[in-house]
Amino acid sequence: ARDGFQPCALDTGAATPMPRWERNLVVAALVVHVVDVGLDLLVVLLFLAHMQWGFFFGTAGVILWAWLVSSLYISFGGGSPAPGDIDDGGVADRLPQFFLNFVQVQIFAEAYRCVFHNGDTDYFHTLRLMEAILESAPNSLVQLYALIVWAGTGDAPEGAGPLLRLSVFASFVSVGLGLAMWEQKVQFRTSSMYVAAVAVMRAFEIASRALTLAIFAGLTHPYGFWWALLIDYGVMLFLIVRHQSVQFTYGLFVALPLVLVSLEPLVWRREDHAVPKDSYYMVRILEFVLMWVLIIHKQDTVDAKVDSRAVWLGCEALALISTLGLYVTLPFVWRIARRHELSRDVADWGEDDANKGLHGHGWNSDSDLSSSGSDRMQDDQDGELPPE
């Protein structure tokens, strides 16, 4: 039935079919999103029921902040038509879109369009990224903090520990997957193997950072948590100003999520990062060493906590394992990313090396190639890959 001439997408004007692995990735990301948001809401109810007001307002505030920012972006910011455009329906059209996104309906619509109508995944990738860096990452830290200083004590209900552990794990997966999908989005062609490697590395990164910060905050409770975040925010802001890749006003905002995880795709050039990766990870290594000097120095305090000693030791072990995982996987991912470095604006289309996508060097077969990017790129008649 498949013999004879088969019209290509370029001839018919149809969009390039989305690879099966990319469809599966969208479905998996949607499931992770639903599980992560659902568990965060259950944790909010847990804190409310047991009158843990600090953790309640912290977790609920993070959720409302993340939903508000993503809804404003989709409705009134970069995700909406510019005022005066022919497609701009004004406030009357934007308000329903705002509320649909705020109640988490928009992401289902985008996932449905991607999977069943071969739609562009830009909106879906953006919503997942914003949920990951604005909700999952900070809530993983807040909930780990609660697990250490409250859930392991006799005042907490029996189910608090398992619920918090499950929610934190879902947040780690959400952050890893969200940042990996952004890595996929900025490239015209990439492979499932590379996206999976980035997801694992990024999950290790947020796990290492959140666990170490939570242990440090527990040992310096109640003020060490805030001092650590404030000092790190100042360091990130200093690095942003020194590098001068983004405007200062934008740097004030982007420095917030940088306190927990590096944002930009690894394939971007060094000059396109708000904080270059080499500077960022050097700061993280230095902070890790300083925090663990204090943690080891105060280990007697941990040993004296009879009720929660198992929780403390478990978090310490996981922090060390995740840090090891990060710095074992990072060199491999970094090497591939540097081999296929891209401009943030993807401006240099004429260079000879621009034709080489992340589909070579044994990372995938032709069927693994992604069709992501701001516009779905199509192969020319000679079978050459589009420039990146």
Image: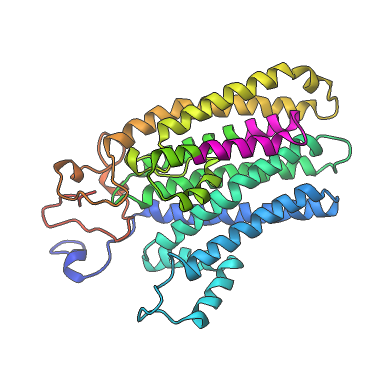
Looking at the image, the residue that sits furthest to the left is: 382
Q: Residue at x 64, y 33 (%)?
A: 213
Query: Would you say 107 lies left or right of 103 here?
Result: left
Which secondary structure dominates the residues rendered in magenta?
A: helix
Identify the residue shown where x is 39% and y is 39%: 243
Quadrant of the rendered structure where residue 171 is? Answer: top right
Left or right side of 68 for 189: left
Q: Is residue 372 left or right of residue 326?
A: left
Q: Is residue 16 above or below residue 357?
A: below
Q: Is residue 216 magenta?
A: yes
Inspect this view and state whether residue 56 appears.
yes
**Can residue 170 be found in the magenta stretch?**
no
Q: In the displayed image of the protein, which residue is found farthest to the right?
A: 155
> What colouring does the structure picture have?
rainbow
Q: Position of residue 70 (x, y in %)?
A: 53, 61
Question: Could you tell me which residue is drawn at 46 percent across and 57 percent down?
Answer: 126
Q: Nearer the viewer, residue 4 or 30?
A: 30
Residue 81, given in percent of the width and then of the height, sits at 40, 73
**Hey, which quadrant is residue 351 in on the image?**
top left
Q: Give the vertical position of 90 relative to 229 (above or below).
A: below
* Magenta stretch in the rendered image: 210-237
| Rendered location of residue 221, percent (x, y) | 77, 33
- Front one among 176 and 34: 176
Q: Quadrant of the N terminus?
A: bottom left
Rendered location of residue 260, percent (x, y)? 56, 40
Residue at position x 39%, y 53% in the image:
22
Task: Give the answer, above or below, for where 287 lies relative to 113.
Answer: above
Taking 361 as reference, is 41 left or right?
Answer: right
Q: Is residue 7 visible?
A: no
